[in-house]
């Protein structure tokens, strides 16, 4: 009888430990700018309830095995049943300790060296042993009523979370699918470059010889512009075909919510039977972080995460960004402690302070080559980062031009792989940039689209934007235009109004270079936007949302020059657009 009681009492223990772990991580994320803190309170609570659920089946199997072993080895080895819960709680102690040390001393195990790693190992082992003893002592005298309460809590929370997750798995209505022609889709974005610095756009130095060689077989937008000054924002707009004013993904950590979380190109492709891959950069350009649900089945090396389970990979719910971030945090720390992962250098790599082979463009190309060897159709998004401003801000023109030539060479290598594998003539290849140099949205960015067999090759001088990419691809494939798109198809020039305004959320350029990575919690009415830029004709306008001050100037190298609007008329058009989008000028 005592053995059976011990068996029954220990079965829900690991689940309760998991819920405790999720609760403390949730408190951490909800009190800082994160994917949780930007949600309304009701959705925050859903995140807390749903986050542990995908881990429950595997953890239940582990706990069942441990409890069964302790039953046969009772009483001498009864502590075997406590191992899963103690391990989870020891991991929680590690995370809490790391949070505290980083908050006070800026010390983290993820970026620590050998001596600190030894200290963290000691913390984990000591806490594991202490939890084993504590749980053993408590369960030895636990009452029958307490055991029933433990079971009720575990079953109720798991059951409710599972039901809510199941209700969130279906895509929103109005998301189409490819039907007949299913071309492969390759989006190549190159970080932070101006069109005027590329020889394909007339720059004197040969910075893009390969792009120049395919110009005649591509649709070339002479005057293309980004819709966001931050990579996170602009690439979310590019993948969704929605302006940040519509999606409200203005600055990180804002993310797509509700039906909008399913309204994007990778989601359409995946619904149509495509394999999907994203190779960009965590925290700055990641679709999962931006809340794109059921989009990229493989993204940014998450498949290497040792703590993921098949269910965590397949479940798309409101808790997914939080769940993946919590997995990443623990995996990075355990990987560093065990010596199987180097110091965390994501941020250092992005801002040019250190080179991390893990996030290098060279590795992205190797990963893409492996992906292309699989079945068709497929969709891939690759963001080349080695031209990032942090890499060349302290260098001269020669170094920057060399970085551009290197990016051009990487594009040539990708085209070579497509040709060698006989996939080029059934693949749409889009080549663009997330924003101009110095995070500007007022300068032209490259945009070349090469369709199979060089179809639709021409130059387009009208103003176009990154949100035009999705409707253009869908139009080529004959997919009906979804109502939620903001962009226009470039396949029909008459559908692109010559006088339309290109709007972007902007960070006003060099004055905010030091603040660009400072994240605030985005809140209405302006959702974290500091300034808004608009391209009207060949003139750019930047409006400070705090005080309404507006500056303007001519777009450098614009190939379709037009007289600027009167200041009052420009402000009227921009103001009307912002009011319609729910934004406010101070």
Image (cartoon, rainbow, N blue to C red):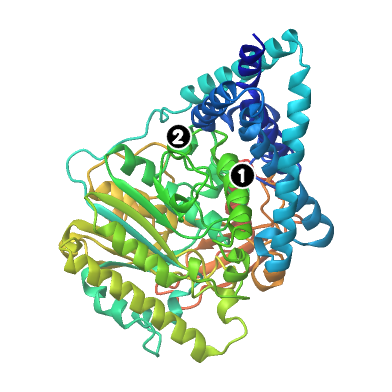
Residue lying furthest right: 104
According to the picture, the residue beneath numbered tag 2 turns out to be: 311
Q: Quadrant of residue 418?
A: bottom left
**560 lies left or right of 53:** left
* Label 1 – label 2 distance at C-alpha: 15 Å
Q: Nearer the viewer, residue 441 or 385?
A: 385
Q: Secondary structure at mark 1?
A: helix
| Circles 1 and 2 in contact, beta carbons < 8 Å | no
**164 lies left or right of 119:** left
Residue at x 59%, y 16% (from the top left corner): 155
Residue 429 at x, y percent in the picture: 29, 62
Q: Secondary structure at mark 2?
A: helix
Q: Nearer the viewer, residue 527 or 347?
A: 347
Name above or below for residue 225 compared with residue 35: below
According to the picture, the residue beneath numbered tag 1 turns out to be: 326
Residue at x 62%, y 31% (from the top left corner): 80
Q: Is residue 259 visible?
A: yes
Residue 542 at x, y percent in the picture: 63, 63
**345 lies left or right of 223:** right
Name above or below for residue 181 compared with residue 160: below
Name above or below for residue 116 compared with residue 95: below
Q: Which mark is residue 395?
A: none
Q: Where, quadrant-wise, is the N terminus in this rendering?
A: top right
Neighbour tally class for label 2: few under 14, some 14-19, many 20 plus, Cα within 10 Å: some
Neighbour tally class for label 1: few under 14, some 14-19, many 20 plus, Cα within 10 Å: some
């Amino acid at each position: 009888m005592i053995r059976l009681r011990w068996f029954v009492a220990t079965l829900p223990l690991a689940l309760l430990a998991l819920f405790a772990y999720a609760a403390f991580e949730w408190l951490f994320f909800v009190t800082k700018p994160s994917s949780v803190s930007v949600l309304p309170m009701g959705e925050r609570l859903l995140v807390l309830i749903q986050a542990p659920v995908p881990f429950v089946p595997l953890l239940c199997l582990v706990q069942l095995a441990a409890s069964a072993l302790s039953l046969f080895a009772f009483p001498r080895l009864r502590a075997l049943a406590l191992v899963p819960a103690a391990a989870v709680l020891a991991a929680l102690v590690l995370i809490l300790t790391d949070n505290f040390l980083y908050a006070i001393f800026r010390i983290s195990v993820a970026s620590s060296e050998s001596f600190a790693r030894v200290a963290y190992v000691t913390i984990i082992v000591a806490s594991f042993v202490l939890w084993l003893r504590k749980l053993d002592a408590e369960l030895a005298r636990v009452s029958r009523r307490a055991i029933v309460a433990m079971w009720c809590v575990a079953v109720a929370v798991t059951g409710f979370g599972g039901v809510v997750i199941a209700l969130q798995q279906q895509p929103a209505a109005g998301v189409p699918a490819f039907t007949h022609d299913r071309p492969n889709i390759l989006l190549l974005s190159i970080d932070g470059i101006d069109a005027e610095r590329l020889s394909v756009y007339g720059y004197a130095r040969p910075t893009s010889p390969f792009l120049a060689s395919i110009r005649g077989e591509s649709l070339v937008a002479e005057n293309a512009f980004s819709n966001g000054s931050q990579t996170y924002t602009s690439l979310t707009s590019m993948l969704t075909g929605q302006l940040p004013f519509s999606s409200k993904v203005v600055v990180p950590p804002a993310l797509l919510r509700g039906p909008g979380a399913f309204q994007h190109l990778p989601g359409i492709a995946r619904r149509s039977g495509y394999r999907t891959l994203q190779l960009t950069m965590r925290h700055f350009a990641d679709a999962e972080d931006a809340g794109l649900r059921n989009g990229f089945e493989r993204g940014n090396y998450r498949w290497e995460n040792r703590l993921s389970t098949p269910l965590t990979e397949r479940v798309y719910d409101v808790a997914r960004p939080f769940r993946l971030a919590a997995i990443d945090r623990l995996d990075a720390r355990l990987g560093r402690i065990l010596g199987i992962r180097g110091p965390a250098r994501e941020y250092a790599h992005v801002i040019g302070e250190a080179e991390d082979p893990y996030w290098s463009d060279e590795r992205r190309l190797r990963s893409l080559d492996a992906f292309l060897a699989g079945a068709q159709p497929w969709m891939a998004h690759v963001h080349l980062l080695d031209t990032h401003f942090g890499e060349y801000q302290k260098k001269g023109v020669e170094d920057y031009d060399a970085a551009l030539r290197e990016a051009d060479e990487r594009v040539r290598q990708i085209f070579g792989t497509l040709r060698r594998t006989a996939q080029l003539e059934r693949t749409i290849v889009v080549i663009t940039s997330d924003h101009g140099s110095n995070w500007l949205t007022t300068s032209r960015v490259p945009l070349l689209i090469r369709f199979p067999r060089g179809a639709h090759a021409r130059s387009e001088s009208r103003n176009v934007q990154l949100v035009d990419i999705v409707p253009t691809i869908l139009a080529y494939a004959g997919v009906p235009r979804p109502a939620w798109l903001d962009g226009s198809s470039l396949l029909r020039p008459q559908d692109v109004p010559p006088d339309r305004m290109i709007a972007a959320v902007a960070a006003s350029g060099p004055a905010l270079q030091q603040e660009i990575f400072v994240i605030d919690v985005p809140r209405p009415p302006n959702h974290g936007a500091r300034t808004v830029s608009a391209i009207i004709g060949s003139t750019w306008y930047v409006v400070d949302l705090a005080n309404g001050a507006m500056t303007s100037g001519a777009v450098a190298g614009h190939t379709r020059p037009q007289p600027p609007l009167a200041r009052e008329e420009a402000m009227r058009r921009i103001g009307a657009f912002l009011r319609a989008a729910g934004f406010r000028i101070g």
